[in-house]
Image (cartoon, helix red, strand yellow):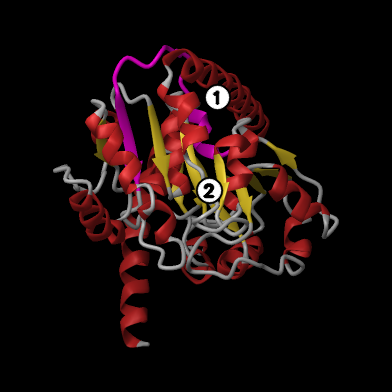
Amino acid sequence: MIKNKITAFKILFKAFFKRLKILSSKQKCIAYIGGHGHNNYGDDVMFNILEQYLRGQGYQLITIHSFGIEKTLRHFKLSGPSFFKKIILGGGTLINDMWYYKVESLLKLNVPIVALGTGVGSCGLEQNKQIDFLKWKTALNVFEEVNVRGEISQKRLLSIDVKSNVVGDLALLNGKIEVSKASRKKIVLNLMNIKEYNSFWESLIPKLKSLINEGWEIVPLVLNPIDKDYTKEYFEKLDVHGDFSLVKNEEEFLNIINEASFSICVRLHGAVLTTIENIPTILFGYRDKCLDYMGSIGQKRFYINLDNISVDQFNFDVLLEDLVDVESNFEVRKIINSRVLDHKNTIISHLKKIL
């Protein structure tokens, strides 16, 4: 308890002086609720992309804290409607039990709030696959707009009589316009250690070894600190030496995926970040947030639902055929590019309304 109070005081102290400086500059501010700031590059990307866009519109994006901290800051006009024009509930999958209390309590600040590219469901291994959303109904009906990642999210909210718009993942705001053919036999491999599912991607080792023998390069993409050891062990089984450093910024990420033909991902962030660059992906669905995203960019075919098949039924070759071939790979890239840019434009149009 004492440790939590000390942590809260440190956050309050830091936020007070940062916002005091912003207040004196008379800069307009938008508050952000998201999973960033915890050494998870995928969540950090969403904040950074939105921050960059809003900066170009004359706004500063600021992380909003717990209601207790914000309530204190409001006494100094460093929070609440006098400081924030809007609160954005961003990404990734936040409409669930884990985030409910924070969002519901922050409504007491009386700052207009919108959801933008938010997922509805289990955020990952920290939660059960099935989530009860009913308690969100009252809170979401206060929102000015509810804009979600995909159709699964939209249908879930409709089941509790909450209407929403599908705008795609917030990270698609960084979608790239240029799309070109694959120029190198390179595969980006993103993994995580999930005991109940590891046998699926471990069954790929013989196939990946055969691709290596055919001249393909396979490189690791580590997006979370907890994935490093497992990824390293997996690559040792492939007899491949790689750089298993945690991705910390866009430069490092782009260096890893440079000229890649496609990616194979377990983490949703891996799939989102590579498809933003118009690189096709095969995504293992350990939670249905993965299908929510892949459906939104027209890539359901390259989504593998691990709960519907056994390892013996798992056939990876069919998916590989379309991605190792340069021409069919390019057709997939064009579909991704079209859907990503559509969502990007939709997100921008909603941002213009918000501002």
Where 105 falls versus 95 (above or below)?
below
Front-most of residues 285 and 131: 285
Q: Residue furthest right?
A: 161
Q: Is residue 114 visible?
A: yes
**Count of labels shown?**
2
* SS category of the residue bearing label 2: loop
Magenta region includes residue 270:
no
Magenta region includes residue 182:
yes
* SS category of the residue bearing label 1: helix
Kind of residue at badge 2:
Gly
Q: Which label number is shown at residue 336?
A: 1
Where 62 falls versus 295 (above or below)?
below
Q: Is residue 168 visible?
A: no
Does 126 sit left or right of 116 as displayed? left
Which x, y percent locates residue 285?
54, 51
Which x, y percent locates residue 57?
50, 26
Residue on which the image places disc 2: 91
At 42% from the left and 44% from the top, the residue drawn is 265
Which x, y percent locates residue 351?
61, 32
Does 155 sit left or right of 288 as displayed? right
At 37% from the left and 72% from the top, the residue drawn is 8
Image quadrant where residue 182 sits: top left
- Find the magenta span and give its range: 169-190
Kind of residue at badge 1:
Ile
Where 351 falls versus 152 (above or below)?
above
* Disc 1 packing (10 Å; few <14; some 14–19; many ≥20): many
Image quadrant where residue 6 sits: bottom left
